[in-house]
Amino acid sequence: MSEPAATRLASVQARIAAAARAAGRDPGSVTLVAVTKTFGAEHIEPVLDAGQRIFGENRVQEAKAKWPALRARCPALELHLIGPLQSNKAKEAVALFDAIHSIDRPKIAAAVAEEMARQGRRLTLFIQVNTGEEPQKAGILPKDAAGLLRLCRDELKLPVAGLMCIPPFDEEPGVHFAFLAKLARDLGLDQLSMGMSADFETAIAFGATHVRVGSEIFGGRA
């Protein structure tokens, strides 16, 4: 590993600020979610020590194994679930995470609503949209997003903050970011979780409020 993670974190923070300013935005309007999937506590602690407080994980089981101890050490941290959620993991997810970026079907929304009510927790929620309509990828189809949002808000009383997407890896991401931004505006949502290590600056230009950056901070995954 070349530079320490704290140095790479500072570099990413500077790039986020520069991209926001270039888009005529306040750098403070972009939240960095440092993605720690596959990285253990020894990799995360230097980034915590450098002041990062918002982290993302892809899997409930992996997060459950490493985050309770880290949270005991740093109660102010926020943990975001950015990977797909299965309804049988909703109880653990609601207990462990502060935000879920991957609400993508009525069954998941209902399970999360039930657990939030049962546990007395209020999470920040994003609906994941499959902007590329890829059959192998999680996310609701764009044409069904309004219906899912109505269900979440009106029936389940869920606090949906915004939309999330992961563009197809072989397509221009800006097209998908622009599409998601317009869909969010049409639905009256102001939060956009979009952009990863390879394209977060582009996402910021299109209005991302949350960027999910892992390898640019922690290095390549094994």
Image (tube, rainbow, N blue to C red):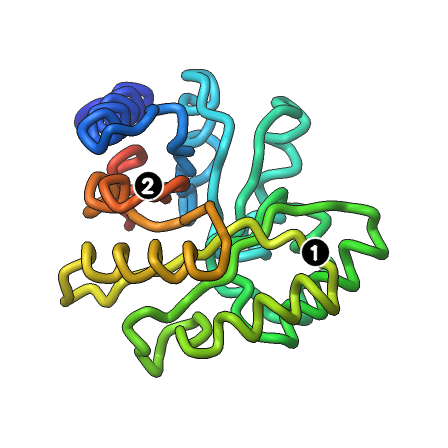
Callout 1 crowding tier (Cα within 10 Å): few <14, some 14–19, many ≥20: some
Real-space Cα separation, disc 2 to disc 1, in angstroms: 24 Å
Kindly identify the residue that appears in the image at 53 percent across and 51 percent down: 81
Give the number of marks: 2
Q: Position of residue 31 (x, y in %)?
A: 42, 33
77 lies above or below 37: above
Q: Amino acid at mark 2?
A: Val
Proximity of marks 2 and 1: CB atoms separated by less than 8 Å:
no
Residue shown at 27% from the left, 55% from the top: 177
| Residue at the outermost bottom position | 135
Name the secondary structure under disc 1. Answer: helix
Q: Nearer the viewer, mark 2 or mark 1?
A: 2
Reply above or below: 44 against 194. above
Q: Position of residue 119 (x, y in %)?
A: 83, 51
Image quadrant in which you'd find residue 107: bottom right
Any part of residue 184 in sight: yes
The residue depicted at 50 percent of the width and 54 percent of the height is 188
User: Which of the labelled discs sits on residue 144, or is there none?
Assistant: none
Residue bearing the label numbered 2: 213
How many residues crowd around disc 2 within 10 Å: few (fewer than 14), some, or many (20 or more)? many
Determine the image quadrant of residue 39.
top left
Please give left or right for residue 141 compared with residue 15 in the image.
right
Left or right, residue 215 beside residue 78: left
Judging depth in this view, the residue of 31 and 221 nearest the camera is: 31
The tag earlier along the polypeptide, 2 or 1, is 1
Residue type highlighted by circle 1: Glu
The residue pinned by badge 1 equals 92
Residue 5 visible here = no
User: Which quarter of the figure is the N terminus placed in?
Assistant: top left
Residue 98 position in % (x across, y down): 62, 42
Q: Residue at x 34, y 58 (%)?
A: 182
